[in-house]
Amino acid sequence: MQIGIRLHDVAPGTIEERLKIASEQGFSCVHLALTKTINDHSVENSALTPGFASYLRNKFGEYHMDIAVLGCYLNLAHPDPEEIKKIQERYFAHLRFASILGCSVVGTETGNPNPEYRFEPASHTEEALQTFITNFRPVVECAEKFGVIMAIEPVWSHIVYNSKQALKVLKAINSPNLRIILDPVNLLSVENSSEYDKVIQEAIEDLGEYTDVLHMKDFVIEGDKVVSGAPGTGVMKYDTILNFAKKEKPYIQMTIEDSTPDNAEWSRKFLENYSCN
């Protein structure tokens, strides 16, 4: 396993300062979300130049760190066609940037059919799924042109809410450049959380062969919400997902999520030392 961290979860600072901290904490890769990590200069589409990509590639190389995922988490089911065009352009810019950055995967979630990007009953309809597929198809075609992997992350409160819906997208678009970021906790709701291991097993059965990156976190139930936290801080057992990683995905990159500067290194060690049954 190669364990990384979302760079914006590292203690605040410049990207160079955050990168140094992540390296010192023993992480080998990062999930990079530009707008959440860089605030001292523009990261608009026009700023994502080959020069900027080369600078970051060299800076990450100094610390022997990889960019596991370049995050671009926008709403590809937005109901306004003009907004969809802008959103697609943002993905195109990230894919072009990733091809020079040396980052093989651009990651996304799958949105909701409203401007607010919030869950509603319509999110889980076939109509919403087809809207997402239609709007997503040009993004995957762009990924093919740049030789970059575009990976979707199923999330229960979004359009692609389980592994079966994800399979529909994979088969409908049918591209070798479309893959999966598997985050087991994101597949959980209050209703299915008591059977979380069954949910994870089903996701591995359906999506295991397509999974290129893992997102790792933990969870607890608070009232009517699934509240996530860093690995080792909740109720989750990791036998199923870590056995899958160790046996079927040698050297897969996995990034921990929802960590804090105080528990990130502890959480990494928790995963590394976890003893599977």
Image (cartoon, rainbow, N blue to C red):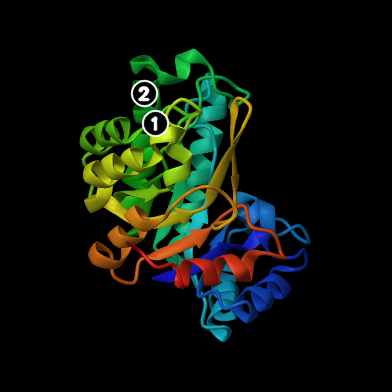
Left or right: where 59 falls relative to 121:
right
Sort mark 2 into few (<14), some (14-19) or many (20+) by Cα contacts within 10 Å.
many
Q: Secondary structure at mark 2?
A: helix
Question: Where in the figure is residue 192, as x and y percent of width and height?
Answer: 42, 29
Depth check: give the residue in front, 55 or 217: 217
Quadrant of the rendered structure where residue 175 is?
top left
Sort mark 1 into few (<14), some (14-19) or many (20+) by Cα contacts within 10 Å.
many
Quadrant of the rendered structure where residue 247 is?
bottom left
Residue visible at 23% across and 41% down in the picture = 206
Question: Where in the figure is residue 49, as x and y percent of width and height?
Answer: 57, 63
User: Furthest-front residue in view?
Assistant: 277
Left or right: where 41 falls relative to 76:
right
Query: Mark 2–mark 1 contact, CB under 8 Å?
Result: yes
Residue visible at 53% across and 24% down in the picture = 78
Residue 177, disc: none
Q: Which image quarter holds the N terminus?
A: bottom left
Residue visible at 64% across and 57% down in the picture = 259
Question: Which residue position is annotated with label 1?
Answer: 160
User: Furthest-bottom residue in view?
Assistant: 62
Residue 129, disc: 2
Say above or below: 233 vs 110.
below
Residue visible at 51% across and 57% down in the picture = 70
Q: Amino acid at mark 2?
A: Leu
Q: Secondary structure at mark 1?
A: loop
Left or right: where 124 falls relative to 35:
left
Closer to the camera: disc 2 or disc 1?
1
Depth check: give the residue in front, 117 or 157: 157
Q: Amino acid at mark 1?
A: Val
Say above or below: 183 vs 273.
above
* Residue 50 in view in this figure: no
